[in-house]
Image (tube, coloured by chain):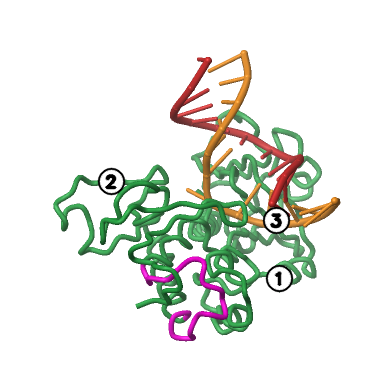
Chain colours: A green, B orange, C red
Amino acid sequence: MPEGHTVHRLAAEHQRMFGGRPVAAESPQGRFAAGAARLDGRVLVEADAHGKHLLVRFDDDVTLHVHLGIYGKLAFGAVPAPAPVGAVRLRLSGRGGFADLRGPNACELLEPGEVKRLRDRLGPDPLRGDADPDEAWRRISRSRVPVAALLMDQAVVAGPGNIYRAEVLFRQGVDPMLPGRGLSRAVWSALWDDLVVLMAEGVRSGRIDTVRAEHTPEAMGRAPRVDDHGGEVYVYRRAGAPCLVCGAEVRAAVLAGRNLFWCPGCQPSASVGG
DNA sequence: ATTGAATGGGGAA
DNA sequence: TCCCCCTTCAATC
């Protein structure tokens, strides 16, 4: 679930459901009991997202910081809320509904200075209007780290995860192992612009679709195929299957502890886009 | 009943 | 580079 587009949707949902009104907070599981007690009854001022981090500001400048990690989930529902099921770390409820948080990587309260520190260590987020891609380019253009790893480094770019990085590199024809400093400025711009388009579409639809109209199963007379994550993609989790564009076998490798997928035909070694 | 995998990330070594 | 955190669900015994 949680790449940056999901977290932006969750922020919008919090704003819509709770914004400007007091909320009730509890920790049915008990592990966030003290934090929930501190939030209980406060007015939710603003919910925001930076990359995969959800930042919910309450009156008196207390900010709830949630990072879902790889397992975490947020589930919304209508009030009256049913008895909590499973390990609910935090339940917020208000007139407009309730939100249950399970399995987050982070669920904590931050002071304003800590929020600033968190934001300062994150790179530009393609989904934020205040994002400056040059900030990322300054790091990328100096780095020997493979571009596929740089795109997963939240200090370089905040928001893309394993699916978007694989898909954007495929769409731009970039070899995942190319070191950052091997990229031209033009290719970085193309990668960034494509992330902006793909992720904004992800916020609208709530899924990750990256296949261009001319390569859809309908356009190419193939059986439709949707990945388990709920979108239509070129290479993510398609190892061993034929590339939708050139027919070469999609490859997989582990890079920095994460599964990387690419097409050796469309993204040959040292290819720099086009 | 148990294991493994999953769209993350921090910290130690 | 590994290990650990946290939770759910599907696959396997």
For label 2, count other residues whose C-alpha is less than 10 Å away and answer few (under 14), some (14-19) or many (20+).
few
Q: Chain of mark 1?
A: A
Tag of residue A60: none
Q: Are marks 2 and 3 on the same chain?
A: yes
Which chain does tag 3 point to? A
Q: Is residue A21 at least partly visible in the picture?
A: yes
Q: Along the polypeptide, which appears first: circle 1 or circle 2? A: 1
User: On the image, which quarter does residue A159 sit in?
Assistant: bottom right
The residue at which mark 2 appears reads as A225
A266 lies left or right of A154: left
Q: Rounded to the nearest whole Å, what is the CA distance between mark 2 and mark 3?
A: 38 Å
Residue occupying image coordinates x 50% and y 40%: A77
Residue wearing tag 3: A64
What's the residue at 30%, 60% (across, down)?
A: A211
Residue at image mark 1: A121
Any magenta on residue A184? yes
Q: Separation of disc 1 and disc 2 at Cα? A: 38 Å
x%, y% of residue A251? Answer: 41, 53
* Magenta stretch bounds: A171-188
